[in-house]
């Protein structure tokens, strides 16, 4: 196992809020700041510096891309917004009836997407029983719940052949896989990898088939193979890692993190999150 003890990657940004939803699109890194309600885009090939691309006041605030469109899960509004990059975002789907605390969205090649739903009140703390669900939206925006009983689903990734969905269960120390059926339903639930003593958050599949996950309490980003018992690489951070994304060519890893306050920071305007985004060469 390779281990990097210090966050030696290039810093794209720092001094921001609670950063999440790491993505690559058109050769550029993207991420969301939940506290400011801003979606940022970095420079080509991970060059330093970011620019604000969209503003959606929602906590959580997660996004992905369907073709050339930006799709945003506005959890506070119970809706999914959609529009061209740099253009107006309009309501695409009302998802309030599907569940609450949507903290991840991942697009599908057929124009649909999946949503993570935590189904708890963040002000009251994290759930102690597996109450998380996954909802599917088809290409028209029609939605339904397709999986339940998840221990805080907190990140998702779709395999290159669009046949498998991998979900990070933060409170179970698991990466859980489902078969994606033709109609978007999920079946054949199984353990993709056990990651004990970890709290896997935002995840990303590498071209090799391995999975990277961010880890808040252990302040790191970790690479693990399917059915692997030990990480193949660990990148140490100096704050909680909330999400990561491998570039399409597998050469770079975008990681976003922040100073976690065990939940107390959500309601504390004086908490210094110091949200930071790095790009690491792989």
Image (tube, helix red, strand yellow):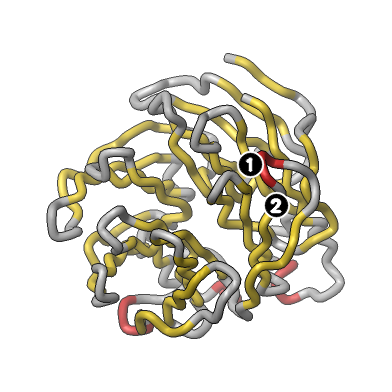
User: What is the number of the mark on residue 254?
Assistant: 1
**Location of residue 135 (image quadrant):** bottom left
**Location of residue 36 (image quadrant):** bottom right
Q: Can residue 128 be seen by looking at this rendering?
A: no
Q: Earlier in the sequence, mark 2 or mark 1?
A: 2
Residue under the image location 40 percent in, 46 percent down: 157
Residue under the image location 23 percent in, 72 percent down: 144
Q: Is residue 275 above or below residue 75?
A: above
**Location of residue 79 (image quadrant):** bottom left
* Tag in front: 2 or 1: 2
Of all residues shown, which one is farthest toward the top? 1
Q: Position of residue 122 (x, y in %)?
A: 56, 72
Depth order, front residue of 27/153: 27
SS for dot 2: strand
SS for dot 1: strand
Distance in Å between CA atoms under marks 2 and 1 = 10 Å
Residue under the image location 40 percent in, 59 percent down: 67
Q: Position of residue 161 (x, y in %)?
A: 26, 39
Which residue carries the number 2 mark?
A: 42
Q: Position of residue 83 (x, y in %)?
A: 47, 75
Q: Is residue 91 above or below residue 134?
A: below
Q: Split into 4 quadrants, where in the image is the C terminus? A: top right
Q: Is residue 174 above or below residue 261?
A: above
Mark 2 touching mark 1, by CB under 8 A? yes
Residue 262 in the figure: left or right of residue 167: right
Residue under the image location 57 percent in, 31 percent down: 222
Residue 169 in the figure: left or right of residue 28: left
Depth order, front residue of 201/165: 165
Residue 102 in the figure: left or right of residue 95: right
């Amino acid at each position: 196992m390779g281990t990097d003890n210090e966050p030696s990657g290039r810093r794209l940004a720092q001094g921001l809020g609670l950063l999440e939803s790491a993505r690559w699109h058109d050769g550029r890194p993207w991420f969301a700041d939940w506290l400011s309600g801003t979606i940022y885009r970095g420079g080509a090939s991970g060059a330093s510096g970011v620019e604000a691309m969209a503003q959606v006041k929602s906590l959580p605030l997660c996004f992905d891309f369907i073709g050339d469109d930006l799709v945003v899960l506005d959890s506070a509004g119970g809706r999914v917004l959609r529009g061209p990059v740099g253009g107006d975002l309009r309501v695409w789907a009302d998802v309030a009836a599907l569940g609450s605390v949507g903290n991840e969205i991942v697009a599908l090649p057929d124009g649909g997407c999946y949503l993570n739903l935590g189904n708890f009140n963040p002000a009251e703390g994290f759930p102690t029983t597996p109450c998380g669900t996954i909802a599917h939206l088809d290409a028209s925006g029609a939605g339904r719940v397709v999986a339940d009983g998840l221990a805080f689903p907190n990140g998702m990734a779709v395999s290159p052949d669009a046949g498998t969905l991998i979900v990070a269960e933060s409170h179970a120390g698991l990466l859980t896989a489902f078969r994606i059926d033709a109609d978007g339903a999920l079946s054949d639930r199984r353990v993709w990898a056990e990651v004990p003593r970890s709290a896997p958050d935002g995840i990303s599949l590498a071209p090799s088939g391995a999975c990277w996950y961010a880890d808040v309490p252990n302040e790191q980003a970790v690479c693990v193979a399917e059915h692997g018992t030990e990480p193949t690489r660990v990148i140490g951070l100096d704050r909680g890692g909330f999400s990561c994304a491998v570039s399409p060519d597998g050469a770079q890893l975008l990681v976003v993190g922040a100073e976690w306050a065990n939940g107390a920071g959500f309601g504390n305007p004086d908490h210094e999150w110091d949200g930071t985004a790095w790009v690491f060469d792989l």
